[in-house]
Image (cartoon, rainbow, N blue to C red):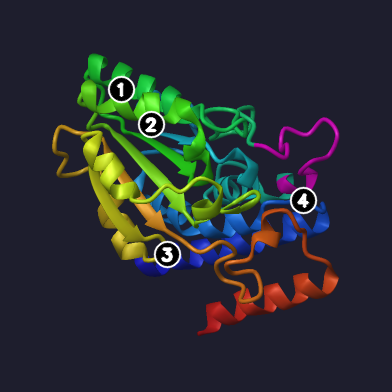
Amino acid sequence: MTDSTTDLARRIRLQCLHMCHTKRASHLGGAFSVADVLAVLYGGLLTADPKQPRAPQRDRVFYSKGHACTALYATLAETGYYDQSELDTFTDNGSYFTSHVNHKVPGVELSTGSLGHALSVAAGVALAGKRRQAAWHTYAIVSDGELDEGSNWEAILFAPHHRLDNLTLVVDYNKIQSFGSTAEVLNLDPLADKFKAFNWETIEVDGHDHAALAAALSKQGRSGKPRVVIAHTVKGKGVSFMEHQLAWHYKSPDAAQFAAARAELLQEDQA
């Protein structure tokens, strides 16, 4: 799966770059940091049928970092939920492809972008699955800065209390949020120890290592606890002049930056 998902992640980044450039959109750095997580999930790990996005037996993915919408929209297009040409309407008046994730898009479970909500919804859905003895699994993907929201910590208490081992939380831990580093704004460390204290099965991985992600995100070998995968990622991953740069939380690439970034991503494919 690793080779195919690596190529998928590259295509996701290229599509995000195109969307942010052509529509002068933001949050490219965060879209790049989470691209590998999405590629591994949608590249074969999920029980999902793009032709039946509401099938009852599907795994559920709640993408809480809805501001980085281009990554999820691109992933769903690349994996067959809709034609890629539909992304040309991104941010257009009347388009379902809004600048924060919209549940009217096929494959999107919940409209997100007002941070701190999706994990609570995911925990409730996982509890419903438990009570129905359903086979499907629930995933929630949150940004690190989003963990400043208290509503997340209510859900983090709730999930182990109900032994929701059918729930996996992924933290896109790129360590940069809207106005600075997470260490400066509201320090989360030691993050793994916090989750362990809340009785979560806690795994830390390189969030750009597809083999490590696939093992951590697997639905097998559950311990009776919810699992958190703390994915250590790089904001702007894949483009040298965007990596670790706060500015790419907001900036959209101009023509020269677009060309340079695209060249780097295409070169990565040839490496």
Residue 148 rendering spot, x and y as whole percentages:
50, 37
From this viewpoint, is residue 1 visible? no
Q: Which residue is mark 4?
A: 25
Q: What's the amino acid at mark 4?
A: Ala
Q: Secondary structure at mark 4?
A: loop
Q: Position of residue 68 (x, y in %)?
A: 62, 47
Q: Is 58 or 143 nearer to us in this picture?
A: 143
Of 64 and 45, which appears nearest the observer?
Answer: 64
Q: Secondary structure at mark 2?
A: loop
- Please give the name of the residue rendered at 36% of the width and 40% of the height, measured from the top-left corner: 169
Kindly state the secondary structure of the residue where label 1 is placed.
helix
Q: Is residue 98 magenta?
A: yes
Residue 53 inside the magenta-drawn segment: no
Instruction: From the image, state whether disc 1 or disc 2 is nearer to you.
Output: 1
For residue 58, which numbered disc appears in the image? 2
Q: Which mark is residue 54?
A: none
Q: Which residue is mark 1?
A: 158
Hey, which residue is sitting farthest bottom in the picture? Answer: 271
Which residue, given by chain and number where applicable, does mark 3 sit on?
A: 208
- Of residues 198 and 4, the one nearer the viewer is 198
- Which callout, 4 or 1, points at the residue further toward the start of the chain? 4
The mark lying in front, picked from 4 and 2, is: 4
Task: Identify the mark nearer the N-term, 3 or 2.
Answer: 2
